[in-house]
Image (spheres, rainbow, N blue to C red):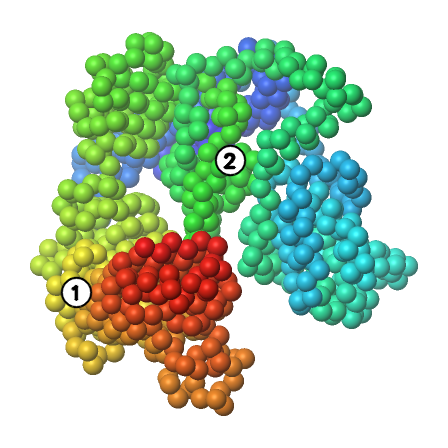
Amino acid sequence: MAEAIVSRVLEELSSVLKEEVSRIINVCGDLEKLASNFQAIKAVLEDAERQQLEKGKASVRDWLNKLKEVSYDIENVLDEWSTAIFKSKLEKKKVCSFIPSPSFCFNRGKLLLKTAHKISKLNGRLDVIANERERYGLKELSVEKPIRREQTTSLVNLAEVCGRVKDKERIVDILLNEGGIYVIPIVGVGGIGKTTLAKVAFNNEKVESHFEKRIWVCVSDPFDVMRIAKAILTSLGKEDAVQKLVELEDVLKLLRDSIKDKKFLLVLDDVWSEQYERWGLLRDSLSSGSVGSKILVTTRKETVARTMGCTTLFPVEQLSEEESWLLFCQIAFLGRSNEDHENLREIEWQSVLDSEIWELEVAEEVFPKDHVIEKDKLIGLWMAQGLLKGTQHRDMEMVGEDYFNDLSMRSFFQDFEKDAIAGIIRCKMHDIVHDFAQFLTRGECLIMEAGSSSSIEGFNESARHVTLMIPNSSDGCATRIYDARNLYSLLVDSDGVGEHDVDLLKLFEKQKFLRILKSQSARINISGCGQLRSLPCRMGNLINLRHLRNVWTDCVEFMPKGMEKLTCLRTLSSFVVDSGGKGAALSELGNLIHLRRKLGIRGLRNVRDEREAEKAQLRNKKGLTTLVLTIGLTYHDKRGVSEASVLVLEALEPPLGLESLQIWAYKCPTPTLGVWPSWIVSLTNLKFFGLGNCVDVERLPPLWKLPSLESLCVSKIGGVKKVGVEFLGIETSSLSPSSSSSSVVAFPNLNSLQFWDMEEWEEWDYGSRGEEDIKIMPRLSSLVIESCEKLKMLPDSILQSTTLQNLEISGSPVVSSRCKGEYQPHISRIPKADIW
């Protein structure tokens, strides 16, 4: 833990030495001495951390704490210097671009002298710490070569395998399927049983007889194509031929020829690499195998599976409590009788109970146990603490994603919550990992509760990271928080808004080094402030701002002018176009080229010229995956829409990689106009599409060609009376008997379809020849129809669907009645059917 702050300070020292402060001889010398001491200390940090953990040396722990304290203090001095320089440069620009003011020069000199004095004192403290490393016998450890991960084999004792019966059956069924050559990824955290499951399937009798060749290769890291190819060839009995080959080209050709027209099963165990090029080389050589060949891959990373071209993952979940206990007994009580098992079951693990890790008080927690951690917010915390460094080609946010994924793969987190677009969005930390983190950060991180005397008494003024709990019923106060002058992060958790809320002005006066302020209090938060009417007019001055999360702020009527200056912005939840010219124009979005994930735009009916929409340059924002376009100022604003709005919508063409799109509060000005933007059908990666509160719109957009669309939600499309062939994007003439039925599939990947509050909708019919001429929604598993009072029938393709697992119909009396009558034989086949 100390290495993170030491490395960060070293990097900052190096940066400052390159700036003009290095011209001051005394300061430069002290800075160089600081850097030298830190380098010497950093060399022995690994030994210090090891002694603290393995030998429990309190003296070493104290030494590490003193090191972290002085490191934080040095970082604060450097931050003060950098902040002052930045502010003075801004002032210089305001006064004159070329002639500095006398006050500017005076303040700069005064600051240098003050900084030099502080650095000199800190050098003295660091000298003592550097000298103490010899007293504690701390040594520089030799750099060991990374140990290669243990190689696995296909051998397994089936009698010792616990659980996984259903998983094994599913894997075997997939392997025995006679489809083409494809990859089956088994994905899960380390130690969950992926390799064991692969072994069980590999050694299944039916699998053995099904494949002509079965090959097992342990891949690990790196993904060495030459080694893997040679291992496969050796399994095929080509060892002598392989030894004569040197070039990768020749090895891959031999591999291609050796498996040509053979039905093979290849297991690639423990794959880590996401480099598509390496996998591509191997895949091309394996493509000569016979139809029905399979490649079974085990990996901790979902991104690896996607790199290998897999769209469907086989996740391995935790064993049940009973299965876990059986596995534990099998290993812990090896060779003992069942009677011994029961006698030893209540054993006290004294060495574990005596560990200092359990001697922690509640006041030393950072996040409480079982706290739900938001992935994006956690990455934001890392960024604010200076733990992430971006590169020319990778943002800090992307580096943070990599760190999070690496920690997840190593079981640092658990209980993941996911969505269809962004992957993991929330998680928790295991209790044992939580306790270990507390042990390493004791004194730096704590929780305070207003009104709790024990919490306040345990308050350490040198704390850097504090969570302040303010119960609504608290009769105490939180004034001690202002005494902690060196806070880096403050998380305020308040049950309500009252007298105990933190005074922001006072807090900012006292806390010069605060990098993170997070609060559940409505007086501090931006997101979720339903009464907030405007954002600060000078927000454009925050030129380093990266994330503006302003969701659920529906009363905000415009964005402040100058938004175009926020060129570092990565997150902008909502952009509002106003009608009076007081705020930023839509075109200001054009400069925000780094926007990613989700963007919402409200008030599009106020844009009078499509050229302004074109200047927003949405198509060039490749990082956007979700776009919400609201024509009115809110989702429910149905006021007049001009013909210009149709052109504006057309001009707001999003990036082709968009995965989620919503269009709200649209009103077609004339029925004859082309209602929907032409670019919709080009969004081949779109997974979710939502339409809502669109009055006077008589036709739904032609969505049938979207190959990736998985979920479609349509609500309150007031003018639609019939959903027919136009919904499929094909004309009636194309449904002639001569058309090729094998080449036409409507909604090939749609699995969820919802219709809500379609007041005028009467007919849903694809024509009498629909099923014969076209495959319609072949993967539909869930259909919801609610409050569609005039709907008369369901199409045959829906009633005869063999994939439908869930059907919910309410507020549609005619259809509900037919479901209980003539449709009943079809409805009875659906596992879950709720008809009201």
In the rendered view, does 680 fall on the left or right side of 96?
Answer: right
Instruction: Identify whether 411 is placed above or below 695.
Output: above
- List x then y, in percent, for residue 587: 23, 63
Instruction: Identify whether 574 is placed above or below 486.
Output: below
Q: Secondary structure at mark 2?
A: strand
Decide: few, some or many residues near mark 1? Use Cα within 10 Å; few <14, some 14-19, many ≥20.
many
Which three-letter amino acid code belongs to the residue tagged 1?
Arg
- List x then y, in percent, for residue 780: 46, 63
Q: Which residue is mark 1?
A: 605
- List x then y, in percent, for residue 336: 78, 21
> For the point 60% across and 25% down, which residue is it?
46
In the rendered view, does 231 fall on the left or right side of 717?
Answer: right
How far apart are the alpha carbons under marks 2 and 1? 45 Å
Outermost residue on the right side: it is 240
Which three-letter amino acid code belongs to the residue tagged 2?
Phe
Q: Which residue is mark 2?
A: 413
